[in-house]
Amino acid sequence: RRSPPRTGARIRAHQVATILAIIHDTSIRTPSEKDENRSAALRQSRDEGHRTKQQREKESRTKGIPSTVGSKMAIHTNLARNTGTVLFVCATSDRKAEAIACMRDAGFETRALSAAEQSIPFNEQIYFQHLKSKSLGKVLYVAPTMVSTQRFVQERYSQMYRDSMVLALKQTSGKGRGSNTWTSPEGCLAFSFVRKIRVEGKNLPFLQYVLSLAVVQGARTALRECGAKEESLSKLRIKWPNDLYIEDRKAGGVLCNSTYNDGSYVVFCGIGLNVKNQEPGACLSGLLDRADGACCDVDLDMFLACIGSQLETLLDVFEEEGFSPLLSSYLDSWVHTGQKVMVLDEERSLSCPVVVQGLTSQGFLLATDDVGNQFELHPDGNSLDFFSGLVRRKV
């Protein structure tokens, strides 16, 4: 007996993987659409099998993703469910055509955001007037409604334009920490982006602190542009580890998910911030001190531009120098210095009061007791509120 040709075997393996992916696709389609999608997927798998390594590397450089990731994700990304999301593209002139083509190739209805588009309350001109970044956010995909921007970038990052951001004017199932959801009505700034970053693994937990600080600093810049008073700006602060508060009410949060590939971490960053929506929680426009206490009319475009600019600046510092240059600013922007909390000992049998002083080298809370002993505080892993179940470990 002769063994079958190796090329044919490889093509059949791709076809089997494609068929399995189709079987597990739970989206609702008509029978004719299923047949068309199956045929397209099989053609894609054959093409993928014959593409050269050089072709895959060239395509991955265009999208800004390592070629090994792009090739492994090829079947998944081409068969991921297209839920009918319409994407409007804000981009500089040198990026716009390619940014539109990227998502059209992924099967999305995609078009440039023009000044005549009255249904989208987002001004491209104002956005670029305030965006000071070199790369991050120079391409922005705007969706009137989306299930979750975080889910979108995790499923579609290999097809997105490099350093682009995704903004949803309304999310139907925004993602929070763990299995929590984040309610994102109109007026909430909900966006995600992907950053490939080279840092030591021990420094990766600090990334959420960098994002939180960038959001606070960027939002304060935007509020100044709107005429907010300095004493009002100080009300927006960070609650460890990744929440944003206005006084005692939550106004937003950040979320990081990461994978490791070829010496770098590919980090999926999601941010939700109440800008114009008074519920749930507090909103930033409430800091503009209107006499009747109502939220003023502010622009999401300017807030996103100011925050995006600061995100790129601080992420560059973090990648090059670590978190140390940012620590002082972070502690000046959080709510915890001098805070007294009750914590459990390592056996979780006794509780005692300690005072929060800062962060340890591992990124946990640093606290002292009445006699000056230092402790590192860890969440117990069971409480939704990190501060309701802290466990101390002596430093």
Image (cartoon, rainbow, N blue to C red):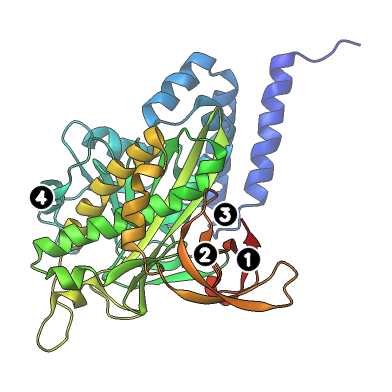
Circle 3/circle 4 CB separation < 8 Å? no
Alpha carbon of mark 4 to alpha carbon of mark 2: how far? Answer: 47 Å
For mark 1, give the secondary structure: strand
What type is the residue that disc 1 sits on? Arg
**Depth check, front residue: 365 or 4:** 365
**Depth check, front residue: 285 or 104:** 285
Where does residue 326 sit, x and y in percent of width and height?
35, 47
Where does residue 382 sit, x and y in percent of width and height?
65, 72
Alpha carbon of mark 2 to alpha carbon of mark 3: how far? Answer: 62 Å
Circle 1/circle 2 CB separation < 8 Å? yes
What type is the residue that disc 4 sits on? Gln
What type is the residue that disc 3 sits on? Pro
Q: Quadrant of residue 252?
A: bottom left
Q: Is residue 80 above or below residue 92?
A: below
Residue at x-position 52% and y-position 37%: 40
Where does residue 371 sit, x and y in percent of width and height?
56, 69
Between circles 4 and 1, the one closer to the viewer is 1
In the picture, the disc for residue 31 is 3
Instruction: First in sequence, mark 3 or 4: give its number.
Output: 3
Q: Is 290 displayed left or right of 275 in the figure?
A: left
Alpha carbon of mark 4 to alpha carbon of mark 1: how far? Answer: 51 Å
Task: Say which residue label 4 marks.
Answer: 125
Q: Is 362 displayed left or right of 8 in the figure?
A: left
Asked whether the viewer can see residue 336, the reply is: yes
In the picture, the disc for residue 392 is 1
Instruction: First in sequence, mark 1 or 3: give its number.
Output: 3
Instruction: First in sequence, mark 2 or 3: give its number.
Output: 3
For mark 3, give the secondary structure: helix
Instruction: First in sequence, mark 4 or 2: give its number.
Output: 4
State the residue lying farthest toward the bottom: 292
Task: Say which residue label 2 marks.
Answer: 367
Where does residue 166 sit, x and y in percent of width and height?
34, 51
